[in-house]
Amino acid sequence: MLNQAGTMLAFNRTVPSTWRKGFRGNATSDVAVMNVSTGDIRQITDTNEQNYRDNVNDAFPMWGADG
């Protein structure tokens, strides 16, 4: 999803493999952000792979009202 200025794109690199409510683990989806003008991609959720037991599904990202 593009932000209001059209400069950043938020997306999931993988689709969630399970929809079980409260699922945690290494099969969850994460949110990444791409700078449209440079093509740089940065993962913004669940960046510490050692804490995979605490990871939750971060599917279908949306921008907040403040961008």
Image (cartoon, helix red, strand yellow):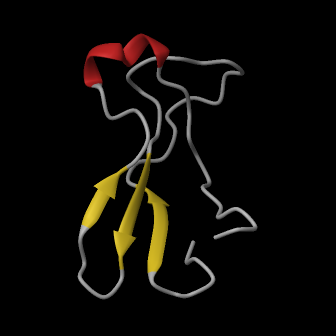
Nearest the viewer among 44 and 58 is 44
Q: Position of residue 29 (x, y in %)?
A: 46, 39
Nearest the viewer among 60 and 40 is 40
- Residue 7 is left or right of residue 59, and the answer is left
**Extreme residue toward the top, this view:** 53
Q: Quadrant of residue 38?
A: bottom left
Residue at 30% of width from left, 26% of height from top?
48
Residue at 56% of width from left, 40% of height from top?
58
- Residue 56 is left or right of residue 8, and the answer is right
Q: Position of residue 17 (x, y in %)?
A: 49, 34
Q: Quadrant of residue 45?
A: top left
- Residue 40 is left or right of residue 14, and the answer is left
Residue at 45% of width from left, 76% of height from top?
8
Q: Position of residue 9 (x, y in %)?
A: 46, 73
Q: Is residue 49 above or below residue 3?
A: above
The C terminus: image quadrant: bottom right
**Extreme residue toward the front, this view:** 66
Nearest the viewer among 22 and 51 is 51
Q: Is residue 34 above or below residue 59?
A: below
Residue at 48% of width from left, 47% of height from top?
15
User: How many numbered marks appear?
Assistant: 0
**Extreme residue toward the right, this view:** 65
Q: Position of residue 50 (x, y in %)?
A: 26, 15
Q: Quadrant of residue 32?
A: bottom left
The N terminus: image quadrant: bottom right
Q: Is residue 14 above or below residue 41?
A: above
